[in-house]
Image (cartoon, rainbow, N blue to C red):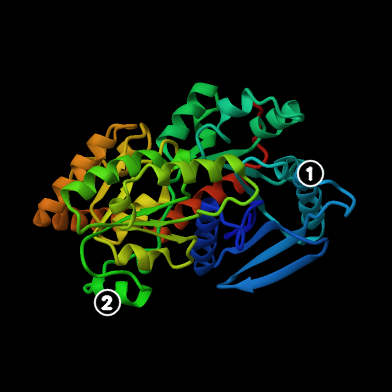
Amino acid sequence: MTDVPRVVMVIQRFRPAFSGQGIQVEAIAKALARRGVDVTIVTATSGTQRSIEVCDGYSVVRVGCDPPSLASPTEHSRLTGPMFAARTFGYLQTAGRCDLVHVHAMTDALYASYAWCRLHDKPLLFEMTLVGADDPLTIRRSANRFAGVRRRAFYSCDGYVAISPALQEISREAGLPSDRVKLIPQGVDIDTFTPVDDRMSVRRDLGLPTDGPLIAFVGSLVHRKGLDVLLDAWSAIYRAHPKTRLLLVGRDNFSGHESETAFLSDQLARVPAAAAERIHRTGVQDDVHRYLQASDLFVFPSRREGFGTVMVEAMATGLPCVIGEQPGVTDFIFRDGSTGVVVGQEDPRALSDAVNSLLENGAVAAEMGRVARREAVDRFDINRIADRYIEYYRALVAGVGKRGVA
């Protein structure tokens, strides 16, 4: 066993394609590289060629996954996953030394990674990222055309990362051996996501108004993220504090996805005109930390997350947070009321009441932000999270001969 394993991470969606998990994978790769781990990220891209870039100590291999030019749009979408799987296997065959493959989220590339790891007697690690998408109960119930292969590959992994207690508990219910499931929360770069003394200066740099409190939401403007709950609450917040502004940072262009486009338009149309004028949409931003640093308070009524890294990013930035409850996620991140306010899910009244209370009690909000920052540094520093991955990688490489099938 090598002291520091060479790791290949596999994730289909990665920059420039927007992916919350992709952002976390890159942060982990940087932290691992600083500790001497040889990390390569394999991801899908357009075209048919393979390209390699080296940045911040790790490598990104982009494998072209475009189907034949005669494929229809529907066939194009359907074939991308299998092509990514095939190209991932091809890369692994030519990559040289690889001690462990770490697959993020459920895509067809899991099949290829499973086949390569078994062929070469290497450990396979699967990271569960979203309840209802890639947890073991969802995989078991899958009606995917390759459902049998999917279940076999998933349940035969050597190890699993659950990024929240919610995913860990689902794993227990599904019968995964507890010694093969490691709880490793997602982390945050505490030097990037850090408080600033002059929020107004940041706002001016970003072209944001400076005439009142700024409430931030970060995430795609979709139903799963609770946008409808937030906008219902926003109307009540605006009535109580008309100088306040709402900042929406995240994907708001859903070209080709009619249901998401219609949902966003319908929700925005329901907001009273005066309140709507004080909503600022930025779209996807690479410098999310700057928008958090410009804000006074963070709200996040998401209905379903694997972890919700943005909540920890807001904490690290020193923001008081008002969050929609998700058992096994929010009770893990916000262990008591000192670091944030957790309100009932689907309850815009509770959300607006909590926000209004913090707007009216600046000293309470400021102290909550200070405690949240300390909590983020103590528990979610990306460097500490990287150390936990290295420990798990070493254990999996050492135990490669002790496999079993759940």
Question: Residue drawn 22% across and 47% down?
Answer: 237
Describe residue 180's horizontal placement relative to residue 249 as left or right: right
- Place of residue 213 in the rendered image (x, y in percent of width and height, measured from the top left): 21, 61
Q: Is residue 162 visible?
A: no
- Place of residue 391 in the rendered image (x, y in percent of width and height, measured from the top left): 49, 51
Task: Specify the quadrant that holds the C terminus.
Answer: top right
Task: Specify the quadrant that holds the N terminus.
Answer: bottom right
Describe residue 107's horizontal placement relative to residue 263 as left or right: right
Question: In terms of depth relative to the viewer, which is nearer, 184 or 17?
Answer: 17
Q: Amino acid at mark 2?
A: Ser
Describe residue 380's horizontal placement relative to residue 143 as left or right: left
Q: Nearer the viewer, mark 2 or mark 1?
A: 2
Q: Tell me the residue that label 2 is attached to.
A: 201
Question: Residue drawn 14% across and 56% down?
Answer: 367
Element at badge 1? helix
Q: Local crowd at mark 2 within 10 Å, few (<14), some, or many (≥20)?
A: some
Q: Tell me the residue that label 1 is attached to.
A: 82
- Place of residue 373 in the rendered image (x, y in percent of width and height, measured from the top left): 25, 58
Q: CA distance from mark 2 to mark 1?
A: 48 Å
Question: Residue drawn 52% across and 66% down?
Answer: 30
What is the quadrant of residue 41 in the picture?
Answer: bottom right
The relative height of residue 16 versus residue 133 in the rendered view (above or below) is below
Describe residue 178's horizontal placement relative to residue 14 as left or right: left
Q: Amino acid at mark 1?
A: Pro
